């Protein structure tokens, strides 16, 4: 079987799976899988840029995705005027002070001659900077958080259209990636892994605790939408007529239509990212990245600046993850920091990339859809299997209820088994790199 | 008197908890460092290995409790510990046979093994959640305190109380025994020496007739023991929740890396460095400073450098600082 036919067949299978969900379960869940599949495919493309192209081991995907989500709040929510006048500038000043003291410490380290004086000077700058930072920041934070804490209690955003948040999410993630890359990229691969794992946890901790930023665990709900609201569609007579003509109940139709619109927007973004990634892969730059990945020493000997190229691709890949994160938060319509779990947002994306085929963009997209489908559908399938397996037991048996409850955790087990099977029997993935 | 009070408050809120936590981290980091030294990869499944060992121990503890078995003031979990270790060892050896051995024979790139360990992590995590569920489980029993605040106040007449929980005492005593036994094993026995030889130079070790499979088996057995003990001690001290154990991966890795991956002594030092920094940075110093400063100079705020939710940030910062200034860790670890 020639390669294009085989690839088309694989994508055909995924399409059939999603269509099958529509026919057997409901079109609502089919579109849900499709939309999140599109977002997952973009995340997988981002990780593939880092791992597939350059061999960088980033296990902090969750952090970048969360930063994207944060960006959608910061861009799209209306600003809270009272909070800004209460302490907005003070918070900004505090943050600026913090940044200045870190920059001063780095400058001191660079400018002074090595020795005890330098170490003491740097530590002194950092301690003084931290004290000043807290002294300026804390009253501002307290003032902002006390402004109508039950509904706002944060600075709000810029009040811009939420579509702008998508590139902004990418930029925010890219900025964070630049800082991390600057410190951690010179290190060995597993150190980078642990460093990114840590950064992701810190990003989530900041989002949970800094209420002035995005309300922390109180969540920001009701983000503006790039598509119409269902309730408005149901009120519009034109829409109701069209739904009636198709023979669908207007309420169902409005839900499906909104999801379809999201799907269209996401598909456009996925197409753009995919084309850019393909162009990058086949450009001289892409060949250089792969040369660095395959033999760093040789590439360095050829005069390639390995560290800079790594930083470049790390920032790019993280930006793509941030973009996807902003899109996902837009789709959810709310930012809930507690939902960010490393297994779901970091390691699952890794499973997608590995199963799809590391180094292959098409593979990343396929993996994104396929693994997301499995992640969603393992639970109902497990439920079915378990209820068949336990049908002989009496309803009162505690084992039966325990087994039925445990189905919810089947998906982790399944993902692990899928990952191990692919790594063992098809280590280059479903669509291998050429 | 104020000075004494300050010392007591410091011990009660910082030193004792940090020593207990540090012992738990050190045991965890020893497991990570052993896998890294012998099998040459960073084992992402370590947190979940701890969770599984602890889970088996918890199940046996409940069974013993239901039969009325107990150790008096000492937690019953210690009685169940050997069974937990055995369960964990069986699982690890099975995993090695089914999963890791294939890649070892291929001499696969270490980073592939790390990804493989991610798969194993998913599976262990799934098993734990299926068997015992994702919720908090408490399994500590026996006497709650070795020294309680009230007793201490009565005995010394100080304003501040000092409490030592049984679990903290058990943690430290167990950790000391385990570490002593481990070092005795690595430095004095033939098998231990062959493990160190294997870790230093695999080819030379093979040439001198050391059986690699035997070394690997012994390593997994040690890892099972260390991970289960670390997990059970942590669970007794706090509580058992699968997700928390997964999150322990970060401080444990930080400890192992700070000490120098592959160096057992480094893992212990790293564990205590991380634990002490976490506790001191997230502790509210108001009380201690209140005793130390002259009257009227007490600080107004809590004097807490970072809120407790940022404890991950602390292990991370130390990790980054050590890596930037001493990339192989405090005790000159190795790098594959």
Image: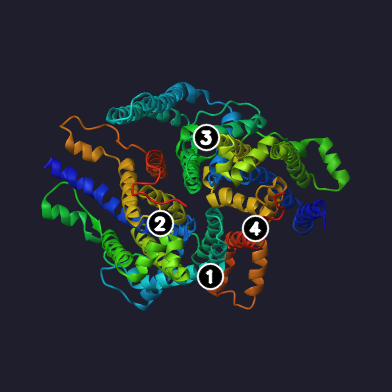
Does dot 4 land on a helix, a strand or a loop? loop
The residue singled out by tag 2 in the image is B33
Q: Nearer the viewer, residue A315 or A325?
A: A315
Q: Quadrant of residue A270?
A: top right
Q: CA distance from mark 3 to mark 4?
A: 32 Å
Q: CA distance from mark 1 to mark 3?
A: 41 Å
* Residue B272 appears in the rendering: yes
N-terminal of the two: label 3 or label 4?
Answer: 3
Q: Nearer the viewer, residue B35 or B174?
A: B35
Return the x and y of residue B32 as percentages of the image width and height: 42, 57
Q: CA distance from mark 2 to mark 1?
A: 21 Å
Q: CA distance from mark 1 to mark 4?
A: 19 Å
Quarter holding the N terminus of chain A?
bottom right
- Contact check, label 2 and label 3, Cβ < 8 Å: no
Q: CA distance from mark 2 to mark 4?
A: 27 Å
The residue singled out by tag 3 in the image is A176
* Total numbered labels: 4
The residue singled out by tag 1 in the image is B97
Does dot 1 land on a helix, a strand or a loop? helix
N-terminal of the two: label 2 or label 1?
Answer: 2
Return the x and y of residue B134 as percentages of the image width and height: 50, 59
Q: Residue at x 25, y 52 (%)?
A: B16
Q: Nearer the viewer, residue B85 or A67?
A: B85
The residue singled out by tag 4 in the image is A427
């Amino acid at each position: 079987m020639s390669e294009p036919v085989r690839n088309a067949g694989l994508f055909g299978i995924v399409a059939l799976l999603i269509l099958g969900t529509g026919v057997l379960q409901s079109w609502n869940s089919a579109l849900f899988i499709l939309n999140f599949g599109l977002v997952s495919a973009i995340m997988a493309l981002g990780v593939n840029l880092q791992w597939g192209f350059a061999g960088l081991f980033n296990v902090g995907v969750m952090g970048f995705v969360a930063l994207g989500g944060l960006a959608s709040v910061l861009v799209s929510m209306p600003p809270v005027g009272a909070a800004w006048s209460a302490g907005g500038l003070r918070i900004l000043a505090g943050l600026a002070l913090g940044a200045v003291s870190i920059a001063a410490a780095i400058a001191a380290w660079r400018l002074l001659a090595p020795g005890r004086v330098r170490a003491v000077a740097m530590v002194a700058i950092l301690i003084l900077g931290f004290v000043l930072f807290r002294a300026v920041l804390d009253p501002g934070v307290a003032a902002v958080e006390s402004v109508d804490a039950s509904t706002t209690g944060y600075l709000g955003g810029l009040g811009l259209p939420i579509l702008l948040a998508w590139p902004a999410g990418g930029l925010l993630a890219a900025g964070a990636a630049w800082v991390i890359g600057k410190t951690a990229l010179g290190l060995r691969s597993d150190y980078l892994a642990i460093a990114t794992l840590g950064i992701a946890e810190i990003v989530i901790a900041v989002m949970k605790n800094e209420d002035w930023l995005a309300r922390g665990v109180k969540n920001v709900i009701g983000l503006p939408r790039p598509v119409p609201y269902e309730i408005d569609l149901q009120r519009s007579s034109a829409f109701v007529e069209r739904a009636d003509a198709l023979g669908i109940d207007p309420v169902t139709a409005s839900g499906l239509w909104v999801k379809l619109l999201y799907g269209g927007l996401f598909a456009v973004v996925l197409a753009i990212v995919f084309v850019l990634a393909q162009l990058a892969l086949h450009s001289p730059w892409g060949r250089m990245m792969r040369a660095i990945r395959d033999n760093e020493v040789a590439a360095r000997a050829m005069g390639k600046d390995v560290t800079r190229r790594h930083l470049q691709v790390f920032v790019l890949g993280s930006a793509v993850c941030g973009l996807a994160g902003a899109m996902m938060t837009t789709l959810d319509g709310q930012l809930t920091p507690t939902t960010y779990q490393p297994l779901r947002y970091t390691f699952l994306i890794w499973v997608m990339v590995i199963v799809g085929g590391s180094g292959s963009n098409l593979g990343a997209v396929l993996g994104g859809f396929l693994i997301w489908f499995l992640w969603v559908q393992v639970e109902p399938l497990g439920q079915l299997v378990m209820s068949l397996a336990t049908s002989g037991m009496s309803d009162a048996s505690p084992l039966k209820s325990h087994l039925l409850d445990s189905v919810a955790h089947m998906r982790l087990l399944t993902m692990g088994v899928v990952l191990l099977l692919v790594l063992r029997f098809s280590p280059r993935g479903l669509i291998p790199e050429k | 008197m104020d000075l004494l009070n300050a010392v007591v408050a410091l011990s009660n809120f910082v030193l004792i908890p940090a020593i207990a936590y540090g012992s738990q981290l050190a045991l965890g980091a020893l497991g990570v460092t052993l896998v890294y030294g012998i099998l040459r990869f960073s084992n992402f499944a370590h947190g979940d290995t701890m969770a599984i060992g602890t889970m088996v121990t918890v199940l046996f503890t409940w069974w013993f409790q239901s039969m009325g078995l107990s150790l008096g003031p000492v937690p019953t979990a210690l009685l169940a510990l050997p069974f937990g270790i055995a369960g964990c060892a069986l699982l690890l050896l099975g995993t090695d046979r089914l999963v890791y051995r294939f890649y070892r024979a291929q001499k696969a790139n270490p980073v592939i093994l790390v990804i493989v360990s991610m798969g194993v992590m998913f599976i262990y995590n799934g098993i734990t959640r299926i068997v015992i569920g994702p919720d908090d489980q408490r399994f500590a029993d026996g006497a709650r305190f070795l020294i309680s605040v009230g007793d201490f106040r009565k005995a010394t007449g100080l304003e501040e109380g000092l409490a030592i929980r049984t679990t903290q005492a058990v943690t430290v005593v167990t950790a000391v025994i385990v570490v002593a036994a481990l070092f005795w094993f690595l430095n004095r026995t033939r098998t231990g020496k062959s493990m160190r030889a294997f870790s230093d130079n695999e080819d030379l070790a093979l040439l001198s007739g050391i059986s690699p499979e035997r070394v690997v088996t012994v390593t997994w057995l040690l890892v099972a023991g260390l991970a289960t003990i670390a997990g059970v001690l942590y669970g007794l001290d706090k509580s058992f929740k699968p997700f928390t154990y997964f999150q322990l991966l970060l401080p444990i890795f930080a400890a192992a890396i700070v000490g120098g991956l592959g160096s057992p002594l480094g893992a212990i030092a790293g564990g205590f460095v991380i634990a002490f920094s976490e506790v001191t940075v997230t502790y509210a110093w108001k009380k201690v400073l209140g005793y130390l400063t002259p009257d009227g100079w007490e600080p107004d705020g809590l004097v807490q450098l970072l809120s407790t939710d940022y404890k991950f940030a602390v292990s991370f910062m130390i990790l980054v600082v050590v890596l930037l200034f001493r990339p192989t860790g405090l005790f000159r670890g190795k790098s594959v």
